[in-house]
């Protein structure tokens, strides 16, 4: 669909060579959201290539899903691959949601792997709250920088658990937090000297170097991941359920 290096290196693209290694964790986020979208009108913010929005509208049985995404190449991909009778996509800025949709339009807003990429996270949270209609729910994830150590040039911020909790509490009175319990690592050794591996990583952009590392891991299914409320601070990724009274 596109030859953009940023598109293929940063995004989870169904059908791409790396998809099998990322789909388990990516899809586990949306599977968690199913109980909050059935029969609801849903906004998927930073919907990327559209696989999550489509899942919410089909298996998740949402009444309708609109995916909004800043990158036009991702929107084109989603429109070609993931549009259904109740799932549509449009280009837009996550920090301007009320401009497109007005106030109190959605029962549920989903933002999976989004918050790290937002230049003004407080404005984003305010916009989410504006487009939600009471009693609305916002599901939002955040990578834990104390566990996820690989640098990503596309991230504006990464919050540890206390910072994430404090950020959400500024905007929502009711916040429920979970952490991602990952399957046991099943990495396959790469038969190269460490010096060669380091040299290859130095030659690659950081996002691509991270994916080279991940290719060592055998794929896991979404069902192998668990969202738990135990020892959340030690998990790799957080997921919050924020409610509008």
Image: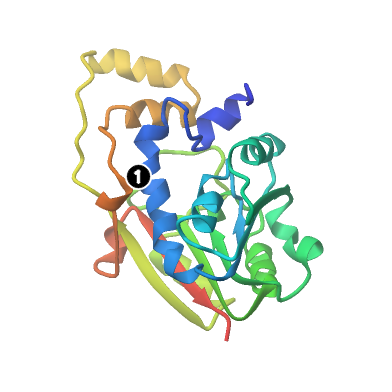
**Which of the two residues, 216 or 145, is positioned nearer the viewer here?**
216
Q: Position of residue 120 (x, y in %)?
A: 66, 58
Asked which quadrant contains residue 95, the reply is bottom right
Q: From what the image shows, is residue 17 above or below residue 178?
A: above
Which of the two residues, 96 or 91, is positioned nearer the viewer here? 91
Foreground residue among 225 and 239: 225
* Image x and y of residue 15, in percent: 47, 29
> Does residue 13 lie above or below 29 as drawn?
above
The residue tagged 1 is 24
Helix or strand or loop: what does disc 1 sit on? Answer: helix
What residue appears at the point 47 percent right and 60 percent down from the top-left corner?
60
Residue drawn at the location 33% of the way across and 62% of the way down? 179
127 relative to 114 in the view: left or right:
right
* Vertical relation: 214 (above or below) 159: above
Horizontal side, residue 102 vs residue 49: left or right: right
Image quarter in which the N terminus is found = top right
Residue beneath the point at 64% across and 38% down? 74
Determine the residue positioned at 69% across, 36% down.
Answer: 76
Q: Position of residue 190 (x, y in %)?
A: 23, 19
* 205 versus 38 height, above or below: above
């Amino acid at each position: 669909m596109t030859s953009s290096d940023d598109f293929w290196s940063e995004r989870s693209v169904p059908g791409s060579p790396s998809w099998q290694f990322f789909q388990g964790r990516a899809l586990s986020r949306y599977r968690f959201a199913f109980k909050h979208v059935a029969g609801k009108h849903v906004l998927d913010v930073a919907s990327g290539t559209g696989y999550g929005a489509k899942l919410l509208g089909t298996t998740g049985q949402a009444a309708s899903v609109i995916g909004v995404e800043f990158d036009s190449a991702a929107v084109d991909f989603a429109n070609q691959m993931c549009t259904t009778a109740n799932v549509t996509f449009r280009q837009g800025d996550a920090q301007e949601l009320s401009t497109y949709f007005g106030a109190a339009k959605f029962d549920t807003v989903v933002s999976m792997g989004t918050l790290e990429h937002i230049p003004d996270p407080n404005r984003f949270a305010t916009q989410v709250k504006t487009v939600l209609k009471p009693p609305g729910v916002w599901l939002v994830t955040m990578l834990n920088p104390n566990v996820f150590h690989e640098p990503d040039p596309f991230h504006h911020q990464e919050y540890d658990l206390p910072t994430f909790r404090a950020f959400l509490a500024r905007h929502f009175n009711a916040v429920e937090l979970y952490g991602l319990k990952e399957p046991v690592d099943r990495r396959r050794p790469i038969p190269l000297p460490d010096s060669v591996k380091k040299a290859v990583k130095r030659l690659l952009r950081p996002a691509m170097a991270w994916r080279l590392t991940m290719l060592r891991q055998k794929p896991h299914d979404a069902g192998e991941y668990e969202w738990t409320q135990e020892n959340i601070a030690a998990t790799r990724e957080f997921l919050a359920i924020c409610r509008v009274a």
